[in-house]
Image (tube, rainbow, N blue to C red):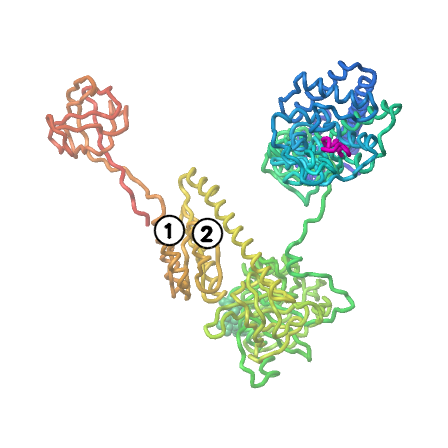
């Protein structure tokens, strides 16, 4: 790499010189300014700096990830250790210890569930007893005082007294987990030799009444708020004694009942079946049936149905350990659920996980980027500063800067191409080159005023069109086609400028080449240069038609000479621009000119697929009284047919009829063909691109989408204007703005009006056309005007009924005109009236202070004599002492003797007080004056 200047290097990196200078200073590289030269070594250092920044960020990121992993592992390990400790404590512990553990567990669970309930010591004993019973015998043995609950696992006891109506399952589900889950039943099973894998549900044991049938446990209670969802798991409520006693009342359990939202049900898992109460005849004991939780089996939930029968006593330790692990898993899961719930409760206020990857579509503001990174904008700005990039929150940064910042945060930045919605809407798909066929060129004519554009257009049309289409009635549809040597050429009828400006403003490129008309007697003029610039910007080849060569003072060589300055060098002089001398008036040289057009077109190899999806551009559109919306369109691809569903801008419809520039009805129109179509539901704008949709619904949807987008954009722009510009204007105190909506009968008039309106020059006031269009004034125009405080100008159009009604309600000013001049002059005067009036000071008179009095609560009263003019009560006043103004304000009071006076004329005495001013002295002069508005001219 050779030496470069700072600014060049900055440009290369798409950065500012200031940024590079800051980096150089940070690197201690002496540098003077943006013109300083950076040698290879310096550049190397800067580049190293960038890669260092990236590397550091990547390392930091990797380190953080590693640390996080380590911490997680550690946590997991701790949890395991804790589980093992618990298990060990339980297996070796005494009854007291067990009780302690049990109490501890209770405490933990109560804490976790947010409950304060703790078992009483009696309950604790009982729990302990019951557990011990089970453990000691290696089997479950119902205790006599628990007869009706059978071998209810201890934790269920807690709620028995609290809620007599609730089944045990509910109690457990509400309060704490059943630690009898899946334990009691297998033991029961062993004892009874009977095992019901699924306890019948419902009937038995409800409300503690005797069951009328099999003792089905009441399912773990329905969870109303989900918070305490069947955590305790089933623990079926014991069935009461059965009526016939044969089958006994059995505590069948279902796991924690379904929670309302389905998320949290059944945490506790399968119902810990308990033995039912003793049946009357005592024939059979109770059976515990369990059903797994609705959503997922919890740790202990699978036990009842699938677990093997209880392990014999020797396996007790293992079992205890397993149970604790299950319990721990439940705790963990519960904790997780609790966390989720709290997040939900906090409405997501919990700090979200920071992204590790961010996808952007290109440059964005610092604020937006910070949002995407979920970082504080200030932090991002700080980082940018460190990189030498000064940016505010609203300033846009490019993807390079974004990448640097992202890497600082250890975030991967993906830059993707933004989705081209318009291309999607326009159903743009790539054409297979094999399907492309040559198409006629589309030509526009440009040039300076009066150089003969219209004459040339007419001359070509007359000499070519009428010759080929005898009998045709030529129609001005904005474009026409002529045939030269059997090959068609399309001419856009609209004088070049509009074709270029309006079309190009809408992104439409319709012209393949342009004929630049230059009058040989006049030479290159301002609009000639403008035309050249337009064509060059659009990358459209130019053929120069040197016109009016019939004129005696014609000097074609001068034209050639002058145009070389603008890069148009004739072939004869070694350039590549074709110059064709013509006389549009005398129709001389036209054939040669047109042949040149074909020649240039050939070089361009203009092609389209006549069988592709029809699409093109609206050249001109208007609202016709008899025919409705009429649009001249240029087909640019495919073949447009009558009956096709067309979307153009914010209008759509089925092509009802199609005519060419000769007024001939057509059934179809191929590439480069201009046709006038009817059938759209509105008037599209010149430059709108059209496409044929397969179904009407799709077309309608697209149009609705566009309309709402347009409305939103308009609202946004206008609200911006109101908030930003207007505020600024108020601040500056000198600029007002007049928002205008222009509606006219044809698009041409709209453009003409807009141009004239925008030219109105009243100092201090800006006119802004916020919306324009052809067609009647509609409700949507009025609503836009109301929202943006605009007036509506209608030219040869009227508001429809709804628009009129709405305008009245919203107090929107609609002005209708038939003459452009009136529009402009009325607007001008309205704008002048709008200006803040200019004020000038008018001195009313002077009074001399002859005496002063001080009156408490009033202050200094000046006894004055009016020397000239008058003093007026409402006037403003200044106090002049020795030619110096010592006070300026208002007269506070004006009295003649004791009475208030409205004014006091020359030669009279009066008493005067000044507003909040008492330092009045004899000999001071009071000057009374008013500010009068001056009418602008
Ligand atoms: N002698 C002579 N006069 C011409 C020729 N071409 C146009 N004119 C005259 O020049 C004048 C202007 O011609 P237009 O065709 O109206 O020129 P224009 O460029 O379309 O003018 P604008 O529409 O005002 O921009 C008319 O009086 C034409 O008759 C020509 O080849 N020879």
Q: Reply above or below: 842 against 852.
A: below
Residue 275: in magenta span? yes
Residue at the extreme bottom: 471
Split into 4 quadrants, where in the image is the N terminus? top right
Question: Where residue 851 sits in the image (x, y, percent)?
Answer: 15, 20
Q: Please, what is the dominant secondary structure of the magenta stretch?
A: loop
Separation of marks 2 and 1 at Cα, in angstroms? 12 Å
Along the line of sight, the residue nearer the viewer: 862 or 613: 613
Question: Where residue 342 sits in the image (x, y, percent)?
Answer: 63, 31
Rendered image: mark on residue 752:
none
Local secondary structure at mark 2 = strand
Identify the magenta region.
273-286
Residue 245: in magenta span? no
Along the line of sight, the residue nearer the viewer: 29 or 105: 105
Residues at circles 2 and 1 in contact by the CB criterion of under 8 Å: no
Local secondary structure at mark 1 = helix
Residue with the mark numbered 2? 768
Q: Residues within 10 Å of mark 1 (few under 14, many from 20)?
A: many
Q: Earlier in the sequence, mark 2 or mark 1?
A: 2
Is 726 positioned to the left or the right of 696 in the image? left
Give the tally of numbered discs. 2
**Residue under the point 44% across and 50% down:** 787
Residue with the mark numbered 1? 831
């Amino acid at each position: 790499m050779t030496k470069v200047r700072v600014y060049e290097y900055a440009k290369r990196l798409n950065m500012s010189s200031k940024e590079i200078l800051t980096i150089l200073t940070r690197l201690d590289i002496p540098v003077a300014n943006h013109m300083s030269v950076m040698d290879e070594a310096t550049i190397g250092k800067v580049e190293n700096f960038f890669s260092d920044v990236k590397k550091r960020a990547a390392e930091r990121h990797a380190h953080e990830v590693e640390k996080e992993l380590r911490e997680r592992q550690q946590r997991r390990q701790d949890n395991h250790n804790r589980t093992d400790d618990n298990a060990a404590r339980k297996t070796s512990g005494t009854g007291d210890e067990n009780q302690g553990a049990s109490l501890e567990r209770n405490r933990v669970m109560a804490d976790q569930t947010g409950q304060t309930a703790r078992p009483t010591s009696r309950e604790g004993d009982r729990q302990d007893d019951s557990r011990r019973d089970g453990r000691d015998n290696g089997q479950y043995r119902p205790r006599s005082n628990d007869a009706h609950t059978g071998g209810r696992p201890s934790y269920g006891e807690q709620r028995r007294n609290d809620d007599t109506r609730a089944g045990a399952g509910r109690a457990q589900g509400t309060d704490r987990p059943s630690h009898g889950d899946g334990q009691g039943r297998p033991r029961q099973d062993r004892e009874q030799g009977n095992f019901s894998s699924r306890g019948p549900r419902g009937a038995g044991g409800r409300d503690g009444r005797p069951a009328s049938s099999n003792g089905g446990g009441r399912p773990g209670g329905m969870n109303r708020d989900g918070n305490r969802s069947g955590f305790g798991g089933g623990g079926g409520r014991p069935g009461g004694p059965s009526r016939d006693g044969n089958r006994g009342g059995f505590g069948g359990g279902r796991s924690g009942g379904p929670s309302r939202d389905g998320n949290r049900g059944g945490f506790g898992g399968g119902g810990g079946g308990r033995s039912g109460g003793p049946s009357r005849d005592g024939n059979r004991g109770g059976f515990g049936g369990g059903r797994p939780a609705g959503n997922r089996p919890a740790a202990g939930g699978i036990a009842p149905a699938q677990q093997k029968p209880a392990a014999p006593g020797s396996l007790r330790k293992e079992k205890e350990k397993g149970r604790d692990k299950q319990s721990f898993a439940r705790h963990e899961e519960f904790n997780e659920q609790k966390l989720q719930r709290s997040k939900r409760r906090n409405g997501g206020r919990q700090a979200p996980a920071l992204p590790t990857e961010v996808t952007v579509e290109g440059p964005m503001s610092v604020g937006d980027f910070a949002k995407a990174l979920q970082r504080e904008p200030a932090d991002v700005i700080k980082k940018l500063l460190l990189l030498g990039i000064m940016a505010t929150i609203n300033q846009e940064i490019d993807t390079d800067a974004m990448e640097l910042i992202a890497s600082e945060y250890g975030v991967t930045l993906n830059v993707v191409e933004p989705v081209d919605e318009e291309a999607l809407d326009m159903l743009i798909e790539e054409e297979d080159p094999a399907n492309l066929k040559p198409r006629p060129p589309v030509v526009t004519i440009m040039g300076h005023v009066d150089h003969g554009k219209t004459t040339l257009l007419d001359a070509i049309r007359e000499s070519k069109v009428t010759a080929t289409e005898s009998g045709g009635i030529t129609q001005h549809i904005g474009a026409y086609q002529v045939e030269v040597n059997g090959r068609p050429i399309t001419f856009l009828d609209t004088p070049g400028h509009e074709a270029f400006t309006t079309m190009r403003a809408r992104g439409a490129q319709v012209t393949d080449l342009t004929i630049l008309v230059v009058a040989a007697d006049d030479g290159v003029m301002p609009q000639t240069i403008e035309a050249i610039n337009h064509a060059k910007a659009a990358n459209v080849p130019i053929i120069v038609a040197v016109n009016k060569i019939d004129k005696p003072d014609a000097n074609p060589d001068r034209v050639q000479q002058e145009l070389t300055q603008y890069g148009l060098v004739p072939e004869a002089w070694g350039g590549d621009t074709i110059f064709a001398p013509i006389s549009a008036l005398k129709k001389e040289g036209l054939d040669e000119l047109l042949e040149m057009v074909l020649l240039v077109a050939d070089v361009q190899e203009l092609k389209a697929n006549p069988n592709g999806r029809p699409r093109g551009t609206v050249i001109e559109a208007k609202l016709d009284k008899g025919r409705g919306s009429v649009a001249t369109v240029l087909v640019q691809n495919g073949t447009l047919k009558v009956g096709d569903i067309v979307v153009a801008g914010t209008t759509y419809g089925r092509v009802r009829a199609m005519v060419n520039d000769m007024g001939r009805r057509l059934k179809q129109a191929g590439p480069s063909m201009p046709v006038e179509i009817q059938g759209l539901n509105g008037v599209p704008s010149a430059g709108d691109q059209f496409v044929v949709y397969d179904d009407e619904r799709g077309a309608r949807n697209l149009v609705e989408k566009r309309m709402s987008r347009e409305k939103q954009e308009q609202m946004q722009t206008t609200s911006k204007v109101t908030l930003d510009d207007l505020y600024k204007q108020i601040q500056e105190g000198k600029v007002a703005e007049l928002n205008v909506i222009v509606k006219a009968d044809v698009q041409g008039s709209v453009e003409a009006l807009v141009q004239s309106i925008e030219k109105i020059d009243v100092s201090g006031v800006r006119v802004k056309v916020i919306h324009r269009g052809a067609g009647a004034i509609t409700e949507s125009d009025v609503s836009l005007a109301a929202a943006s405080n605009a007036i509506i100008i209608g030219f040869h159009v009227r508001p429809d009924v709804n628009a009129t009604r709405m305008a009245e309600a919203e107090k929107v000013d609609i002005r209708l005109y038939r003459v452009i001049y009136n529009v402009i002059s009325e607007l001008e005067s309205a704008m002048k009236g709008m200006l803040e009036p200019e004020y000038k000071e008018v001195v009313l008179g002077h009074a001399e202070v002859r005496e002063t009095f001080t009156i408490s609560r009033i202050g200094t009263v000046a006894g004055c004599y009016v020397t000239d003019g008058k003093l007026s009560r409402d006037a403003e006043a200044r106090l002049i002492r020795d030619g110096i103004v010592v006070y300026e304000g208002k007269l506070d009071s004006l009295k003649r003797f004791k009475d208030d006076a409205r004014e006091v004329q020359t030669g009279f005495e009066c008493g005067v007080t000044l507003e909040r001013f008492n330092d009045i002295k004899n000999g001071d002069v009071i000057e009374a004056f008013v500010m009068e508005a001056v009418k602008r001219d």
